[in-house]
Amino acid sequence: MNLFDLSGKVALVTGASSGIGAQQARALSQAGARVVLLGRRQQRLEELCTEIELSGGQAACLAADLMDLDQLDQIVDRALHPWQKIDILCNTAGVNIRQRAEMISFGSWDNALNLNLKVPFFLAQKLVPQMQQRGWGKIINVASLQSTRAFSNGLAYGASKGGIVQLTRAMAEAWSADGISCNAIAPGFFPTELTQSVFDQSQLSQKLSEQTAIGRNGNLSDLDGLCVFLASHGSDYITGQTINIDGGFTAK
C-alpha cells in the first residue's frame, strides 16, 4: 500500500479561494483525492476547480460564508452532496484583524475567534459522525507562529491560534479512538492575502527570512508534503499534534 495515496478519499478544504487553502486543495488532488473547495468567492473557486480538473483531478465548488453559523447544516449537506462523504477536513479559512489592543472591539474580537476557532470545531463536529461510520478520518487545523509567540497588533488573532493548539488536542482526545486523527500545522511566513502587508515591506520580509534556520520565507509549495502526510494513512498514529512548518523560525 502506498501510504500517501489518497485515491478514493474526499477532502473538504475551507478557505480554498486563495493562499494556503488553495494550495492544500492542489496538493490533495495531486495525491489522488477528490476535493470540495469551500470559500466565499465563487469566481476564485471556479478558477481553481478548472485548474484541478485540467490537471486530471476532480473538484467541486461550494461558495458559502462560514461566519453564518445558522447555515452550517446546509453547508455541510452541500459539501457532502458531490461524493456523499468527506474523509479529510482541512479547517483553513481564517481572518487576521491587525489592531492595537486598545482598538479591539467586541465585533472584531468575535470575528477572529468565531472564524478561527469556533467554526473549525463545529464544522468538524458535524462531519465526524459520517467519518466514524467508516472508522477513519483526518482533520487538519491551522495554527500559527502566534500560537506560541506574541506579535504586535495580533492579540485577537493570537488568542484564536493559541486556542487552536488546545482545540486540536481536545478533538484528538474525543475522536481518535474512532480512527479520526486531528492535527494542526503552524505555518511561518508564506505569501498569502493575510500576510501581504508583510511581504509588501521588503526590509521586514528580509528580516523575517533571516530569522529562519533555512534562510528564506516559505513558498506555498513547501506546504504540500505535510498536508498530504497528515491527510494520509502515513500519519495514522499521529494525533493531537501541532507541527511547525516555518523553516526553523521557532528553532532559533
Image: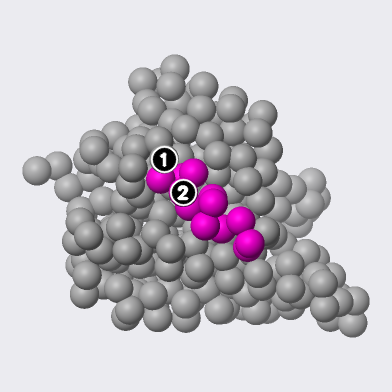
Per the rendering, the mark at residue 81 is 1
Q: Is residue 208 visible?
A: no
The residue range painted magenta reads 69-80
Crowding around mark 1 (Cα neighbors within 10 Å: few <14, some 14 to 19, many 20+) is few
Q: Locate residue 117 relative to residue 228 in the image: left or right.
A: right
Which amino acid type is shown beneath numbered disc 2? Asp
Q: Is residue 194 left or right of residue 134?
A: right
List x then y, in percent, for residue 78. Answer: 49, 44
Alpha-carbon span between mark 2 and mark 1: 6 Å
Nearer to us in this view, 203 or 181:
181
Are the residues at dot 2 and dot 1 in contact (C-beta closer than 8 Å)? Answer: yes
Instruction: Reply above or below: 64 against 141.
Output: above
- Left or right: 175, with 233 as reference point: right
Q: Which mark is residue 248?
A: none
Residue furthest toward the right?
103
Is residue 13 among what the camera can see? yes
Amino acid type assigned to the residue bearing label 1 in the image: His
Quarter location, residue 115: bottom right
Q: Residue 77 bears which disc, if any?
A: 2
Element at badge 2?
Answer: helix
The secondary structure type at the circle numbered 1 is: loop
Identify the residue shown where x is 24% and y is 38%. Answer: 8
Image x and y of residue 76, in percent: 48, 52
Counting from the top left corner in percent of width and height, residue 172 is at 33, 75
Q: Residue at x 65, y 33 (%)?
A: 42
Of 250 and 24, nearer the camera is 24
Residue closer to the observer: 219 or 48: 48
